[in-house]
Every structure is written in C-alpha cells, then in structure tokens.
Image (tube, rainbow, N blue to C red):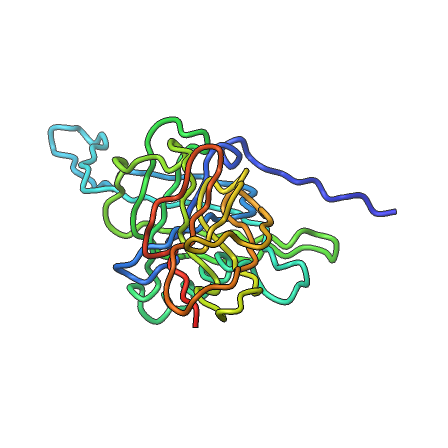
Amino acid sequence: MATTPTDRRTMLARRLRVDIDTGTFPASNYQRLMGIQELKPVDELRTESDEAYEDDGAARESVTGYNWRLEVKILHSTNAAGTSLDPVHAFLQTKFQAAKGNVRLGEFGVRWYDRNGVGDAWEGRAYVKQWSPDGGNGGAQDTVSLVIQGQGPLDAEVTNPAGDLTPAVTGLAPAGGPTAGGNLVNVYGTHLTGATDVDFGANPAEDVTVVSDSHLVAVAPAGAAGTVQVSVTTPDGTSPNVDADNYTYA
C-alpha cells in the first residue's frame, strides 16, 4: 500500500501569503496563490566595482540600485475532476509565455504579507522569469519552481490585507446569469471563512459552500434583470461595495 508523499513546507511559506493581481490594468483583482510549498523573498543590492588606487588592491563597491524577486515552489493544482488548472497557476503560466515575446505583456501585480496581519505588506509589479516543472517519478508530487522577478520599485508601505478581517469580494465567476437564478457562482476574495450570508442585492443565495478563506461557491437566487452587488457577511462584518462584486442578471 502506497503511503502519502511528505508535504514539505518552509516556515516562511506557512507564515506569508502571496496574492497575484489577475486583473487588467488599471483594474485590480488580487487572488491568493495556493499550493505554496517553498517561498523565499529576495531583496538584494545591485553593485559595481568602485575601488581606487589608494585601496591597495582591496575590493570596494558602490551601490547602484537593487533587485527583488520571489523564489517559489508550488504544488501544481487542478480542479477535482482534473480537467483544468488552478486559475492563478494558469494565469502565471500564461504570463510566463507572454513575457517571452514582450516582458511588458507578461507583467502583473504581486503582493505578500504576514497571514496573521502582523507588520507591513510588500507590493510591486513583476513578471515570471522562470517556470520549471520539477519532474520526478510517477509517484512524485507535481511541483513547479518559479521566479517572480520584480519590475521597478518594491513598495513596503501598503496595508497588510490580513490586518482587517472584514470580508472583501475581489471577483466573481461568472459575473452574471439568468434571472431565474440557480447557477453556481464562484466568489473570490479575502476573509470569506465563516460566511453566514451571501446576498445578491437584496436576495440571499440559495446555498453557500466555503471552499477556502479566499473562495466560496454560491447558488444565485432569482433576480430582476440588471446589475446587483454580491455581498458576503461573516462575524467580522460585511464586504464593502466594489466594482468586482457586480453581478448582472439577464
């Protein structure tokens, strides 16, 4: 009888969360990067030789800037049926291919932060510089090593998204459906665990299944033609109204 492969995760990978902005600029739609096995944020100085005759051959360097990147190993995930990739994993793989032709087409927003809301968060623009399936025998986990390379400055002044436990909706799939309702709607966001109500305008969802802290599935109720706000309520509050939570009945 085969035993379950060891699930190796670094302490840093457990403590930090990484979100990927899957929206099209200037819109923003941060989604959590799931399946992180290893995570190494790197922030390093860029230097060049600056030694002088008076240094008697001893090395001296001058700082000319800095580079930043995330070195990540993820467990490549599919849906339960094995028919499609995790949407954020698929997004990153698509961006890697886009960067081969034009690095600007491969850029996206990325942020990482302490999952317990402690301290600051870091955010910047980046592209996937490396996408390397790790391979292995038939029983090995399907892992991918990737380098998310920073483009431009790294902002450490953003608010930690985990500091406020009020739920937030960052995306819907699909973002519309029939007036008769009854269709499944994926609701993406933050702090969705413990959802007590999911409302489509004034009408409560017929059924709600919380998949993770960043994903739940709701059965849309019937509604009049037009656009309504999808709101999520937990013991910590109700999600604020944003463009990303608009659902259109047609």
The quarter of the picture where residue 135 lies is: bottom right
Residue 225 falls left or right of residue 8: left
Q: Could you tell me residue 2's position as x and y percent?
A: 83, 47
Residue 149 falls left or right of residue 223: left
201 lies above or below 154: below
The quarter of the picture where residue 86 lies is: bottom right
3 lies above or below 205: above
Q: Could you tell me residue 247's position as x and y percent?
A: 41, 62
Residue situated in front as seen by the camera: 242 or 32: 242
Residue 229 falls left or right of residue 156: right
Residue situated in front as seen by the camera: 237 or 147: 237
Position of the C terminus, as image quadrant, is bottom left
User: Residue farthest to the right?
Assistant: 1
Q: Could you tell me residue 118's position as x and y percent?
A: 39, 26
142 lies above or below 55: below
Q: Could you tell me residue 226's position as x and y percent?
A: 37, 67
Residue situated in front as seen by the camera: 82 or 5: 82
Residue situated in front as seen by the camera: 250 or 103: 250
Residue depicted at x 29% and y 44%? 67
Residue depicted at x 58% and y 46%? 210
Residue depicted at x 56% and y 47%? 35
The quarter of the picture where residue 64 lies is: top left
Disc tally is 0
